[in-house]
Image: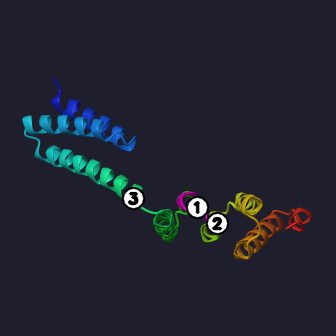
Amino acid sequence: QDRHGESDTLSLVGATHRLAKEYQKALDSFNQALVIKRAIADRRGEVVALRNIAQVYDSLSFDYYYESMSAKERGEYWTRQAKRAEDDSKHNQAIEYYRKALEADPKPLHAMSLAMAFRMANRLEEGLKFINDWKQRYGEDESLDFPLTRLNYALAEDLSKKGAQAEAIRY
């Protein structure tokens, strides 16, 4: 019987459970993999299994901590994640993090950040649609005038470069 393959499969199953936030099932799988790694004297595999178990506890503790945060703290957490993504030029990831910030704490600052992230990701039409939807839902807010102007300008410039001057004038 291929004990290495069995433990590797258990580790993959554990990782799947951890991603699904099924922490007890993940721990069960990782612990079974650990027992096998120890039985076959695979020290490197044992270290990996222990690290996997530690990651489950880390995820579990973060989930408990996140639940204890206020809406403002959650928004600030996701904003920090978004800024790190932007620093790494991962603009689409930043958009997802800003969406989470806005979901946690719907305030104009997060809306403005999301709109600007759309611009950085060159997703201009989505950014304009987002701002217009935001304004319909929450009303006018002058803090959104700057990103709206920037998005309109970028979209007009993009359309103009594509030879669609008549359409660019709308923005």
Label 3 sits on residue: 68
In the rendered structure, which amino acid carries the disc numbered 1?
Leu
Q: Nearer the viewer, residue 96 or 5?
A: 96
Neighbourhood count class around disc 1 (C-alpha, 10 Å): few under 14, some 14–19, many 20 upward: many
The image shows residue 26 at horizontal and vertical percentages of 29, 39
Which amino acid is tagged 3? Ser
- Helix, strand, or loop for circle 2? helix
- If the image is split into quadrants, where does the N terminus sit? top left
Drawn side of residue 94 relative to residue 30, left or right: right
Label 2, label 1: how far apart the Cα atoms are: 7 Å
Q: Are marks 2 and 1 in contact (CB under 8 Å)?
A: yes
Point 92% across, 64% down: residue: 166
In three-dimensional space, the C-alpha distance between marks 1 and 3, rounded to whole angstroms, equals 18 Å
Instruction: Tell me the quarter of the image containing the C terminus.
Output: bottom right
Q: Residue at x 65, y 63 (%)?
A: 118
Magenta extent: 97-107
Judge the density around disc 3: few (<14), some (14-19), many (≥20) Cα neighbours within 10 Å.
Answer: few
Q: Which residue is mark 1?
A: 102
Residue 2 locus on image (x, y percent):
17, 27
Based on the picture, tell me whether residue 82 belongs to the magenta stretch: no
- What's the residue at 62%, 65% (across, down)? 114
